[in-house]
């Protein structure tokens, strides 16, 4: 038998919610377990697809018990949205770091970063996000987009808009200088389409580096400097 509780609630005391209290974001990330869960989910969603991957699969890949994911995410759909959010937030950080490093390097050499150089940095950084280490997150976003709810898509779209915002003035400047081959808006769409498709065909064994991919992409969309 269960022993009676010593805590007797008064009539005016608020009723406590049953079950384990919901964890804060900091508590969810104890020991980086939440991050390990996101990484395992991203890898499996990319390899097997969202529909074919169970939370049990993800828990096992992260070295957790089968019910552990639900301490961090309400359900598998919430975990998918978490993977996409993490992917876009990481992409934003990496893009900002790449641009900051390029600007600093240019300043050390006594020159400002031109629009052509900026586009090179943005394209190279995007290839790193798509094809470099820990690169499962963005491909999952590209190919499992329809599995999100309307609210989840809206949230990820805001991050995506923030990411692409850095490209808009660069493409506009290149168009104004006559270096861009097409309309800035259409070029942005086609540029992301071309770069993102590389996750389907890129093979490091072909000896093509990310710098090689970057140079080829620039040749497609930019005119030769005069």
Image (tube, rainbow, N blue to C red):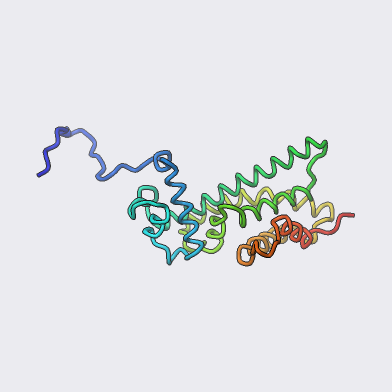
User: Image height check: is 33 above or below 61?
Assistant: above
User: Image height check: is 52 above or below 18?
Assistant: below
Which of the 4 image quadrants contains residue 204?
Answer: bottom right
Left or right of residue 209, residue 180 in this image: right
Quadrant including the C terminus: bottom right
Which percent across, then down, holds residue 223?
Answer: 83, 59
Residue sitting at x 58%, y 52%: 133
Q: Could you say which is closer to the camera, residue 74 or residue 209? A: 209
Left or right of residue 100, residue 34 in this image: left
Which residue is farthest right? 226
Left or right of residue 159, residue 113 in this image: right
Residue sitting at x 43%, y 66%: 51
Quadrant including the N terminus: top left
Q: Could you say which is closer to the camera, residue 165 or residue 46? A: 46
Counting the numbered discs, the total is 0
Residue sitting at x 44%, y 51%: 37
Which percent across, then down, holds residue 178?
Answer: 84, 55
Which percent across, then down, holds residue 88?
Answer: 56, 51
Left or right of residue 203, residue 140 in this image: left
Residue sitting at x 65%, y 43%: 96
Q: Could you say which is closer to the camera, residue 128 or residue 85? A: 128
Which residue is farthest left? 1
Which percent across, then down, holds residue 219?
Answer: 79, 60
User: Image height check: is 177 above or below 199?
Assistant: above
Which of the 4 image quadrants contains residue 79?
Answer: bottom left
């Amino acid at each position: 038998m269960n022993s009676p509780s010593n805590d007797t609630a008064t009539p005016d005391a608020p009723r406590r919610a049953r079950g384990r209290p919901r964890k804060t974001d900091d508590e969810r990330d104890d020991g980086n377990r939440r991050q390990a869960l996101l990484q395992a989910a991203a890898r499996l969603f990319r390899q097997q697809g969202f529909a074919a991957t169970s939370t049990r699969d993800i828990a096992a890949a992260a070295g957790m018990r089968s019910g552990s994911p639900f301490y961090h995410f309400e359900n598998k759909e919430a975990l998918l949205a978490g993977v996409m959010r993490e992917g876009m937030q990481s992409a934003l950080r990496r893009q900002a770091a790449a641009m900051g490093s390029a600007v600093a390097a240019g300043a050390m050499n006594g020159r400002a970063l031109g629009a052509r150089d900026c586009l090179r940095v943005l394209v190279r950084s995007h290839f790193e996000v798509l094809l470099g280490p820990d690169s499962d997150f963005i491909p999952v976003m590209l190919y499992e987009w329809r599995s999100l709810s309307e609210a989840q898509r809206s949230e990820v779209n805001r991050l995506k808009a923030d990411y692409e915002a850095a490209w808009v003035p660069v493409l506009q400047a290149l168009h104004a200088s006559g270096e861009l081959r097409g309309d800035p808006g259409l070029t942005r769409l086609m540029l992301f389409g071309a770069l993102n498709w590389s996750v389907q065909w890129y093979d490091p064994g072909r000896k093509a580096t990310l710098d090689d991919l970057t140079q080829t992409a620039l040749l497609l969309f930019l005119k030769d400097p005069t």
